[in-house]
Amino acid sequence: MNPAKPRQEILHLEKPGGYSGACWVETDQHRLILSHVTESLIGQSAELWIHGLEGVGKTHLGLVIADRCQWSYYDCGDIQPDLASELLEWLDIGVGLVLDRVDCWLHHAEAEAALFSWWKRKENGLVLISTLSPRVEGQVSLADLTSRAHASMILPLDGLADSDLAELFRCQLNQLNVELTPEVSRFLGPRLPRKPRKLMQLVRSIDQESLRDQRKITIPWLKQLLLQLG
């Protein structure tokens, strides 16, 4: 008997706001990771664990991997740990899988057991994304899952260089048809957030403000927004 499909609330399929494949800025580190995925994971039972500080672009990379490889993508932060078993039992073991923010399932006995069971049965690649490396002591509770994690390819992800951040910012604005005055652009240049996630938050806020009664973006307004974004 086929397992029942999971309840609708765990099938969170919407991509996070602000993420656009058209605005993907690819670094040497990205190319290394994507090359490993396409050469070693597709059609194989190998796995890759990506880790990095919050906001450096791990989710964007995970979405790019899922799109290019035609794999399933799930954000564990949007799925309660006690529903992990139901989701993984429903998924096709022959389709590659990207699990973002897998930290949200760790230290939960049922979720870790479900992930270990899937790991043993899967017939395609698996990419897990977290803030900390699985080699950090105490990051994973289940001993068998720890062994699997340590045996996988584990790669860190760093943030973007200033030039890459500026390129990503310009692309996002162009995608939204948002134009900034030369004065505003000069003001923002050296003050852009250093992390892609905060950069995308800035772009969304600028877009919303420019649409509100067709307001122009001003330097005083940007100063206040940058303070809020930290």
Image (spheres, helix red, strand yellow):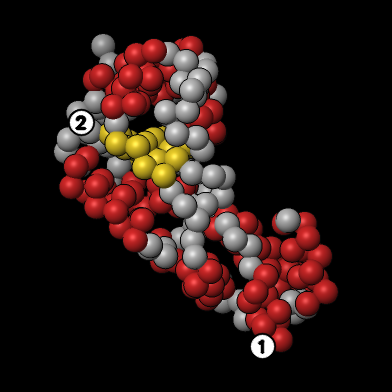
Amino acid at dot 1: Pro
Q: Quadrant of the C terminus?
A: bottom right
- Residue 103 in percent (x, y) is at 51, 30
Q: Where, quadrant-wise, is the N terminus in this rendering? A: top left
Tag shown at residue 222? none
Specify whether residue 204 is in view. no
Circle 1 residues within 10 Å: few <14, some 14–19, many ≥20? few
Q: Position of residue 4 (x, y in %)?
A: 37, 18
Which residue shows up at 37% across the image and 18% down it? 145
- Disc 2 is placed on an element classified as loop
Q: Residue at x 56, y 50 (%)?
A: 55
The residue identified by callout 1 is 182
Q: Is residue 200 above or below residue 114?
A: below
Q: Quickly name the residue at label 2.
A: 45
Q: In whole angstroms, how far apart are the C-alphas of marks 2 and 1?
A: 51 Å
Spot occupied by residue 195 in the image (x, y as percentages of width and height): 57, 57
Upstream in the sequence, badge 2 or badge 1?
Answer: 2
- Visible residue check, residue 148: yes
Amino acid type of the residue that numbered disc 2 sits on in the rendered structure: Ser
